[in-house]
Image: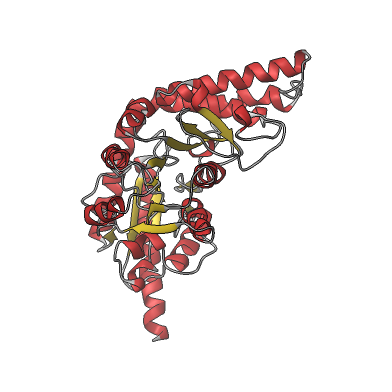
Amino acid sequence: MFAPVYLDHNATTPLEPAVREAMLPWLSEQCGNASSRHDYGRSARRAIDEARSQVASAIGAHFSEIVFTSNGTEANNLFVKGAAACMKPGLLAVSAIEHPSVIRPAEQLVRRGWQLHKLAVENDGQVDAQSYRTALAGKPRLVSVMLANNETGVLQAVDALAAQARAAGALFHSDAVQALGKISVDFRSLNAAGVNALTLSAHKIGGPKGAAALVLDKRVEIEPLIAGGGQERGLRSGTENVAAIVGFGVACELAVRNLAAVAPRLLALRDQLERGLRAMGATLFGLGAGRLPNTTYFALDDVDGETLVSHLDRAGFAVASGAACSSANPEPSHVLRAMGVAPELARGAVRVSLGAASTAEQVSDFLRILQITVSKLLRLTAVAV
């Protein structure tokens, strides 16, 4: 019997068995609050400290630079709003292809006296050099450019961008949620180049939903979004989600340990997928730029993306028509609009994001079903016209 195939790993990943096992005690007998002074509480605190070290080790950071949050959206907001709160309003620059959890808080700051420069991108999805130079000439206080785009998988040279931002006197943040586990992420070297903060999330790397982190240079002052009991060095108050944090730590260890074997295999599968898509006449977005090894974003002429995703779902293939966090928006992807893609083509965009368990057979089956499904949809369109 055919089993449903999950090809939406950029939205979220299946929980790794080893992560689940590590979490189970903290969902049952290990019930302590990490702020309590008794043995249950001390055990919870030790577990959080160990997870903090695991996350830090995975990216070459110091454990004291890890601030746990509930998700990547919170971590992005914590930096953008938290850093801005410690400064006089000025210029803020973010790329036009950022996740909404960077763009929306940046837009909110405009109502508080900040000026916002949305950095243009080239047709391949990389930040436009002239737009960046223009922004830096305005002496921005904050810059945020994501390491890897959640829709296209396009990578940015954040080390070079951060170095330029530092020379202009700006703090630099990068959303690295999609990068961890798919490419090497080294905060120490990025920090040396000028990156002051990174955002990470557990559920993108085989960990649980409900745990993420802002990796923050301790020399940078930010104001907390949530005030209260002073957890996370006073930067994120609230009783910690011990089970999820423990799972995050184990997921980071596994992601780094498996990267050397998983990344080349994902790249081979992506190449197989894209050869098949090209043979069908698909437009592939982000070509010409460095991309994540697992991500393909494509469109076929005269085929609506939402409709195609729905039909593929009924055929047993889970893919996405856009970013999961903005899927309620019926408008064409803001990422593709920024890349200059025509609206009618952007509405057909479909994202396939492979995972560690993906196989060549699954890719072949997907291409076969995609061909059948597209042919049916085009025939229906022809009849309707």
From this view, report whether residue 130 is shown above or below residue 203. below
> In the image, what residue occupies the spot 33% across and 62% down?
338
Q: How is the image coloured?
A: secondary structure
Q: Is residue 249 at least partly visible in the picture?
A: yes
For the C terminus, the image quarter is: bottom left
Q: Residue furthest bottom?
A: 385
Q: Based on the displayed image, in which of its 4 quarters is residue 116 positioned?
A: bottom left
Q: Please state which of residues 384 and 98 is positioned toward the viewer in this rendering.
A: 98
98 displayed left or right of 250:
left
Q: Can residue 2 be seen here?
A: no
Determine whether 12 is above or below 208 in the image.
Answer: below
Up-down relation of residue 146 to residue 321 (above or below) = above
Residue 25 x/y as whole percent: 70, 22
**Residue 148 or residue 90, whichever sits in front:** 90
45, above or below 93, in the image? above
Q: Is residue 32 left or right of residue 73?
A: right
Q: Position of residue 251 (x, y in %)?
A: 51, 28
> Which is more toward the observer, 375 or 307?
307
Residue 58, located in which quarter of the rendered image?
Answer: top left
Q: Give the image quarter of residue 52.
A: top right
**Which residue is situated farthest in the right direction here?**
38
Position in image of residue 207 (x %, y %): 54, 33
Please give left or right for residue 159 compared with residue 44 in the image: left
